[in-house]
């Protein structure tokens, strides 16, 4: 996809989960910080930022979800709004899209273990839904997940799919986009 963007950030790296090159604690901090710059977040959230951590039936996925919950507990607010985080297993892309609409989910975070096909199906199902998707696995951004995290030359990179963000009504202001570069 031509709309992928990179943001380089210096950070020490330790305690990485399998399949997640960036520590989950740091991913949570970055995710909630970046989410606060989404101009549609407050409308989408409706008074409370609801984050769904989507898991697969793997030990690595459960481990990532547990790390996410622990890190999120230290951040009770996102963009000044109270936040709630819950974990659920992935079933079907259509069920996820229905949950996003019915429960006003603001953020969906995919743990490790998702296939390329599943990530593509999720991104297609969420077109038109106002939700920020993020992932522990950087390769999923190329499959339509809006935000991902990677480690390149010892630096954290934020991966961003601009095209899918527009399809999911994620609207980052220029203060975020100015920090990114389009990979070739």
Image (cartoon, grey):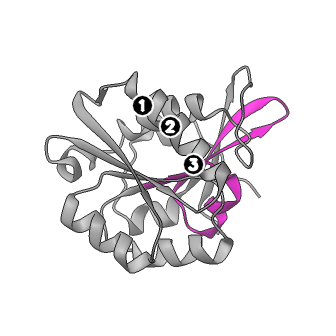
Residue 179 lies in the magenta-colored region:
no
As helix, strand or loop, the secondary structure at mark 2 comes to helix
Between disc 3 and disc 2, the foreground one is 3
Residue 153: name its quadrant: top right
Instruction: Judge from the rendering whether residue 158 lies leftward or rightward of residue 89; answer left or right.
Output: right
Relative to 79, say whether 90 is above or below: below
Q: Is residue 176 visible?
A: yes
On screen, residue 116 above or below 181: below
Q: Is residue 85 left or right of residue 164?
A: left
Element marked by disc 3: helix
Magenta residues span 133-158
- In the picture, the disc for residue 62 is 3
What residue sits right under mark 1 in the picture? 72
Marks 3 and 1, how far apart at CA: 15 Å
Percent x, y of residue 175 = 44, 34
User: In 3D space, how far apart are the residues under numbered discs 3 and 2 (Cα atoms)?
Assistant: 10 Å
Disc tally is 3
Residue at 55% from the left image edge and 34% from the top image edge: 67
Report the quarter where the C terminus lies: bottom right
Nearest the eye: 48 or 85: 85
């Amino acid at each position: 996809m031509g709309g992928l963007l990179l943001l380089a950030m210096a950070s020490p790296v330790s305690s990485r989960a399998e399949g997640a090159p960036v520590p989950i604690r740091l991913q949570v901090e970055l995710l909630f910080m970046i989410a606060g710059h989404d101009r549609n977040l407050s409308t989408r959230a409706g008074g409370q930022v609801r984050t769904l951590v989507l898991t697969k039936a793997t030990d690595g996925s459960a481990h990532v979800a547990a790390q996410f919950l622990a890190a999120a507990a230290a951040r009770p607010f996102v963009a000044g709004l109270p936040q709630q985080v819950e974990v659920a297993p992935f079933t079907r892309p259509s069920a996820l899209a229905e949950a996003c609409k019915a429960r006003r989910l603001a953020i969906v975070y995919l743990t490790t273990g998702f296939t390329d096909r599943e990530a593509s199906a999720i991104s297609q199902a969420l077109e038109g839904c106002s939700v920020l998707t993020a992932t522990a696995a950087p390769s999923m951004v190329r499959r339509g997940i809006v935000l991902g995290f990677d480690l390149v030359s010892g630096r954290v990179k934020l991966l961003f799919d601009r095209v899918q963000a527009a399809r999911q009504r994620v609207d980052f202001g220029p203060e975020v986009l100015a920090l990114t570069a389009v990979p070739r």
